[in-house]
Amino acid sequence: MASLLHRLGRGSFRHRRAVLAAWLLALSAVITCVIAFGGTTDDEFTVPGSPAQTAMDTLKKELPSAAGTSAQIVFVAPAGHHITEPRYARAVSATMAEAGKAPQVVGVTDPVKGKVISPDRTTALGQVRYQVTRAGLHDDSLTSLEGTTGPARDAGLTVRVGGSAYGSGKSTGHSKELMGAAVALLVLTITFGSLFAAGMPLLTAVTGVAVTLLGLSALTGVLTISGTASSLASMLGLAVGIDYALFILSRHRSQLAGGMDTEESAARATATAGSAVVFAGLTVIIALCGLAVVRIPFLTVMGVGGAAAVLVAVGVSTTLLPALMGFAGERLRPRPGSRAARREQAAHGEQATHREQAVHHEQAGRPDQSAHGDEGQRGGHRDGSGGRGARGTMGERWGRIAVRRPLLTLSAVLIGLLAVAVPARDLQLALPDNGSAPAGSGQRQAYDLVSEKFGPGFNGPLLVLADTSRAGNPRAATATLVQDLKAADGVAAVGEPQGIGHGHAALIQVVPDSGPSDDETEELVERIRDEATGWQQETGAKVSVTGTTAVNIDVSARLASSLLPFALVVVGLSLLLLLLVFRSVVVPLKASLGFLLSVGATFGAVVAVFQWGWLASALGVAETGPVVSILPILVMAVLFGLAMDYEVFMVSRMREAHAHGATPREAVLAGSRHASRVVTAAALIMFAVFASFVPGGSTMLKPIAFALAVGVLIDAFLVRMTLVPAVLALVGRAGWWLPKWLDRLLPDLDIEGERLAADAGKGGSDRDGPGLPAAIGGAFTQDRPRQDGRR
């Protein structure tokens, strides 16, 4: 892989104008496709094959108006008056008549004629039915409906319009997302010490995001793509795009500080750091595409859209970025005497010391120190600093604290993360409804009024479909079913049955005592389904439960049942991939367990905020309650890739130092010294981008963005930069052990670029430039230690 990326990086550097033109052409092409084929997004949830969805599909054929979405118009009389007073009743009826003429409306229910009046006679609830789903509504349909409420308002009534046609709110805009980009630019400037260098990762990331979002917009005309999928793709593309470019550009400037030629440095940076970028990107892509196994189209599209954003980010980082390096030339080389130059010179001197120690021990016929977990007592320095004494970078000082008493560090981190994960036991999943919409929105006000005056179940009624085609007496079968439903626990009201299909079926509206996302409503759905067999035996009617609420319940159930299998697949994949990369048993096990700790702590934080209400007002959480059902499985997929990303860059630096003769503790500190700065910058950038989506995010996106932001902080700083050094220092040389039989079985993917290093060691060709110095070869150019501990 490294050899291929080396050629790709060199080619992009040399043919930079052609590469830039190709990306501009791609951008122009997707813009053209958006204009020609673009449509609208569709946030409708469906679960093919589920009981509720099967019944809904039947309704679409037999009674389309019942299968479409609906809106509610809530009329409230002034204080001291009743809605049944003649002048108010006339205004309500006039308004409903006007609503029936609104675009795409196929029917209305006048609450005065239907007697849908609250017990205190102050409020009336009108229903407006559409033949299309929420996604099929035109942009102005709901606005036109709101405009029909004039007669009621003129009469002095308070009117609120809501219902499932409105959803639970959308993002309030993308201005706050710019804050994430601004923070990223600040972090990059501090990291590189150069505003010019800091702008390059941001430029490439924005290019990748633009191509991805425009591509998704172009596909909306032919595929069902949700608005949440586009937001997730934007969030992921910006975050990983900046990070991947940061990794490669950091390696490039490191090599330039060591005196390497600009062209050769761009090629080598693409080959070495680029290999890690490709590996990390593939892990995220595989995990996101794995969401398709859940068999929920909405989630599949989100996964594929996010995977596309990551794929484009990898492509931009390995082609456009080397081309921009070519345009920048010597301007990216750190100035002599600058902080970046001094840091790299110190790193080169340290690795040279490790190589000299390894050669000395090999010539003396003794095992290299890396074969012993002597904590730096043989050769090197007793402080474990690798020759830097008590001073060092912030990352090194942090690493020294972590490994000073590794067992204590390990225990403290484990206890802390497990404590944060405790609330995750109370994790409740549901799909958002208007009860979680922004407090000032019309749909939220309508939802609250309906709950207060009629009961929470009126916000999410169930539809019971009775197929009476095989019943001896269809009318009697329907009457028996209605009587049983009225007597059932948890039922607030049962509507009059509506005959469909030439009288061979009936549709009955059932209003629960509880809200759409309450556990009691789910239990009611299960009870009705359990009783269906008895009703069929007794009356011959086949009964099924459907409606928006029932479909959402089935979606949540499908997601909950898929969580454990998906987690096992993700953890198994991480074990396999890290085994191939590091050829170690301990590293994959440690990485997978660390990932599970990060996920558990993240879910605990989500429950504390979005269910328990901690810091809810500060984060703009409109209503506490069940967490959006897609969050756990989606967050696991994304955090998995990011965790493996940080794992590769941290541990590879440690393995490099170990391979060059450092003791286990010195190797850990060397990895902390060199990788912590880049990983810290990457994590802060990820956090800033994800956190920027929290304040203005939709009800569905807000908890996902929060979970990713918290998860990145936990995984990067507590797991990868604290727990990992402690574990590797504790196990010593066993951390790099692999059974010989397994070493022979595993394929060598050359992810570490050993063939490239071998070619460089032979002097290379004039075309390839000078040989690869071990000091700047990075994490993917070291010689792999032999199993007996000698090089």
Image (cartoon, rainbow, N blue to C red):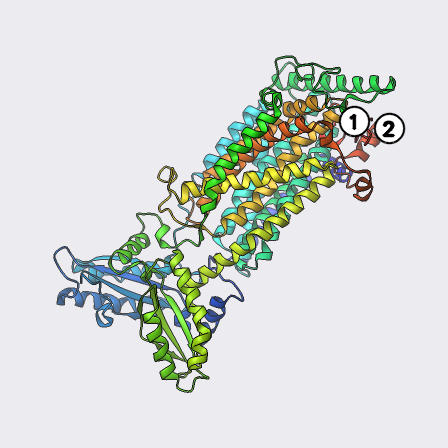
Q: Position of residue 20 (x, y in %)?
A: 65, 40
Quadrant (top left/top right/bottom left/bottom right) for the N terminus:
top right
> Residue 616 appears in which quarter of the rendering?
top left
Q: Which mark is residue 733?
A: none
Residue at image position (56%, 30%) is: 411
Q: Residues within 10 Å of mark 1 (few under 14, many from 20)?
A: many
Q: Which mark is residue 772?
A: 1
> Residue 482 appears in which quarter of the rendering?
bottom left
> Residue 142 appears in which quarter of the rendering?
bottom left
Q: Secondary structure at mark 1?
A: loop
Which amino acid, by three-letter code, is at mark 2?
Lys
Considering only order in the chain, which callout, 2 or 1, is on the residue closer to the N terminus?
Answer: 2
Q: Relative to residue 137, is residue 768 depicted above or below?
A: above
The answer to whether one can see residue 14 in this image is no
How far separated are the C-alphas under marks 1 and 2? 10 Å
Residue at image position (38%, 81%) is: 477
Circle 2 residue:
762
Quadrant (top left/top right/bottom left/bottom right) for the C terminus:
top right
Which amino acid, by three-letter code, is at mark 1?
Leu
The count of marks equals 2
Q: Relative to residue 148, is residue 480 depicted above or below?
A: below
Q: Residues within 10 Å of mark 2 (few under 14, many from 20)?
A: few
Horizontal side of 601 relative to 577 (left or right) equals left
Q: Is there CB contact under 8 Å for labels 1 and 2?
A: no
Q: In this rendered view, identify the residue nearer to me: 579 or 776.
A: 579
The answer to whether one can see residue 242 in this image is yes
Q: In this rendered view, identify the residue nearer to me: 161 or 115.
A: 115
Q: Relative to residue 151, is residue 760 depicted above or below?
A: above
